[in-house]
Amino acid sequence: MKQIKHFINGEYVESASGRTFEDRNPANGEVIALVSEGDRREVDAAVEAANTALRGEWGRMAMEQRMTLLHRVADRINERFDEFLAAECLDTGKPASMASHVDIPRGAANFKIFADLVRNVPTESFHMDTPDGAGALNYAVRKPRGVIAVIAPWNLPLLLMTWKVGPALACGNTVVVKPSEETPHTAALLGEVMNEVGVPKGVYNVVHGFGGGSVGEMLTQHDDVDGITFTGETVTGTHIMKAAAPGLKPLSFELGGKNAGIVFADADMDKAIEGSMRSAFANCGQVCLGTERLYVHRSRFDEFVDRLKKGAEALTMGWWQDDGVSFGPLISRVHQDKVLSYYEKARAEGAEIITGGGVPDMPEALRAGNWVQPTIWTGLPETSPVISEEIFGPCCHIRPFDDEDEAIALANDTPYGLATSLWTENLTQAHRVAPQMEVGLCWVNSWFLRDLRTPFGGSKRSGIGREGGVHGLEFYAELSNVCIKL
Ligand code: NAD
């Protein structure tokens, strides 16, 4: 049986307790690895290694050398592409067609994009007058914050983890990563890459374990952690905030969503269907930016519902390596139970089930996996938990609307504020509506189209702060003002 160990101070180590937990393949339920389960001893060792690295070679390294190393990390991930791909697909069950286009290349690119960005971002400088006439000169310098705890989810494990590790290292910090207990594989593999390209020991550390009462919580409470960056559920964010409060630790949060799509009367229906298919069903609906509520102008409602149903029914479920597979399983049995509980709620509340609503009949080899059908409903009231709560599954509810103000009000009527997609060929309407959406990301005639230089994050209960581009530097670096009296 494969063993996945912690990566601390440049070495793979088992837990002092000897404890392990199982890593299962979501497509067939088989145990693929035993993972070392950390406790305070591994957390302390990793944080100490990260602190020591800050004061050592890494802390003294010239910026150019640091950036070259980060480029080499990205190149080495791409050289070992097939290993990362297999690790990610075995952990998540997602089709190789998706992971080979999104998870692995974007996961690697995060190191290059932030290295290039940090190299080129200026800081401010002011001359000030003083009573003696000589003046003073102020300038800001950007310094690493220190040891960053990176707490990552399971839906895009490598990509979302390096989205944080990339800028953290580019700014000169060191990291202790706590990957999701569901997907420990690629974070562990990245340790080999760090050693191969010569990143000094202690800069990148990984401790495996669980959240509350385990490694996640221990990291967020640790006195020698200088900042916490977290992607995951909104409720977990509230626990982390409480744990971090006594140490007043800076936080960067990317949280849950209940995202809406609006299809206006003059939408290009081909575009709206293609984008909504991806936003509702990609990664088996396990994308934070995914659309679980669709509002469609009444004049196009029947056409949209009919075409989305055909699209959903054409998705091909199966093993990640098989040709033509476009749809994988949910991450775990626990998550499958959660998603199916919403399928049941929708039925109990009288939804019209346009397609899906249950568990598909899979071939024998995959029957023990966490499969659910892509599902579309209509006819539920907006008060239904199916419409107000994040399900994080391959499902959406579609409701007709009559005018623009109604659509905006419906879309904004949620405590979440992550993303929206607007579908319209009317440029004036797009510009009028986009700023009214209470979200961090608003797409027009697209979904998940990301320029990594732009801000990324959620409004309302979908996040705190912005990552991406220069915006992430507000968290990953500390500005310090130098004032020189002339
Ligand atoms: P989760 O909150 O259950 O877990 C995320 C990570 O936090 C895991 O590593 C987990 O072990 C850890 N954790 C759990 N409890 C903790 C605690 N008390 N202290 C410290 N760490 C703890 O989320 P998940 O189920 O892995 O991911 C799905 C969620 O993530 C969805 O809500 C989704 O919307 C959200 N998400 C948001 C974004 C975004 O960019 N906004 C991106 C991806 C996923």
Image (cartoon, helix red, strand yellow):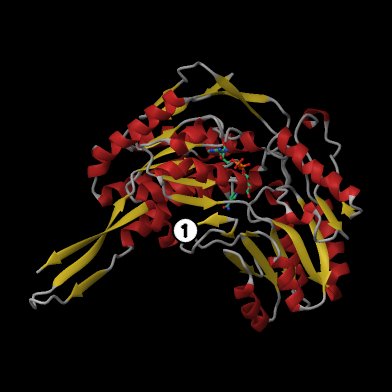
Position above or below: 303 against 87: below
Task: Classify mark 1: helix, strand or loop.
Answer: loop
307 displayed left or right of 32 = right
Ligand 1 appears in which quadrant? Answer: top right
User: Could you tell whether 211 is left or right of 386 in the image?
Assistant: left
Q: Residue at x 81, y 42 (%)?
A: 341
Residue 473 placement: quadrant = bottom left
Is disc 1 surrounded by few (<14), some (14 to 19) or many (20+) residues within 10 Å? many
From what the image shows, is residue 443 above or below residue 188?
below
Going 64% across and 80% down the picture, which residue do you hit?
Answer: 432
Against 19, residue 311 (above or below) is below
Q: Position of residue 442 (x, y in %)?
A: 61, 67
- Counting labels gives 1
x then y, percent, for residue 222: 41, 35
Q: Residue furthest bottom?
A: 428
Question: Which of 109/21 is in front?
Answer: 21
**Which residue is found at the position 58% from the left and 32% from the top?**
181
222 relative position to 391: left or right: left
- Residue plotted at (65% across, 55% down): 257
Quarter of the image for residue 185 reads top right
Point out residue 32 in the picture as x, y percentages from the top left corner: 63, 25
Residue that carries the numbered disc 1 in the rendered image: 468
Q: Amino acid at mark 1?
A: Gly
| Residue 228 in view here | yes
Nearest to the observer: residue 194 or residue 231: 231
Q: CB of residue at label 1: within 8 Å of ligand 1?
A: no
Quarter containing the C terminus: bottom left
